[in-house]
Image (cartoon, grey):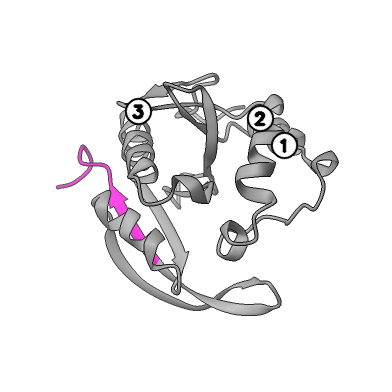
Amino acid sequence: MLPEYYEPGAVIETGRLLLRPLEKSDALAIFRMINHDREVLRYYVAPYMEYESEASVDGTVNSCRERGIYCFAVVLKEEGRVIGMLNQCSVPNEYFPAMELGYALGKDYWNRGYCTEAMKAVTEFLFTKGVHKITCCHITENTASGRVMQKCGMKYEGIRKSELYYHGKYWDTANYYLLNPADEV
């Protein structure tokens, strides 16, 4: 059974972006924007891919559909170009109502407000679906990601020591959250 908050095929539109379900046909764009760029993958936990023939998002697309998890392609409306993705990283339940989000954009689209625009739109959408709490974290060295979270109104929750093992070492993460305004007392 799919979660109550999940809306298959949900599309969110902002001033400059279209956030739509990731599709198998997006594999090459995700490869070019994320998986074939070591600078993007410095802090985004995903495998590096050397060759276009390795490009695939089939497993992600199938898993998300089956489990009722959002994985949005971030698309520039005017060009129809996929520039990254924004995905749900955890599933809330009756005891732990938080949903974690993660994101990555191609480096040519950094520092233009796209990630903040996408995150704000997705958090608003999820709150209308009844999600109680949204969380995000970033490797402490990735201060740009922290600025996105802050611009989205997220509140700093603290550091988790050695929370992530990636690229052969342990990383501390800075954690942020946002509560659904409808649930605040």
Element class at badge 3:
loop
Q: Quadrant of residue 122?
A: top left
Q: Give, as a three-letter code, the residue at label 3.
A: Arg
Q: Residue at x 65, y 80 (%)?
A: 169
Q: Residue at x 72, y 36 (%)?
A: 57
| In the image, residue 112 above or below residue 72 | below
Cα separation between marks 1 and 2: 7 Å
Element class at badge 2:
helix
Q: Quadrant of residue 158?
A: bottom left
Horizontally, residue 32 falls left or right of residue 5, namely right
* Residue extending furthest toward the right: 53
The residue indicated by pointer 3 is: 16
Count residues near mark 3 (Cα–Cα under 10 Å), then give few for <14, some for 14-19, many for 20+. Answer: some
The residue indicated by pointer 2 is: 26
Residue 172: give x, y in percent of width and height.
Answer: 49, 77
Q: Which residues are magenta?
A: 175-185
Quadrant of image for the N terminus: top right
Cα separation between marks 3 and 2: 19 Å
The residue indicated by pointer 1 is: 57
Cα separation between marks 3 and 1: 24 Å
Q: Earlier in the sequence, mark 1 or mark 2?
A: 2
Residue 154: give x, y in percent of width and height.
Answer: 28, 55
Residue 117 visible to an observer of this rendering: yes
Q: Are marks 1 and 2 in contact (CB under 8 Å)?
A: yes
- Whether 183 is among the magenta residues is yes
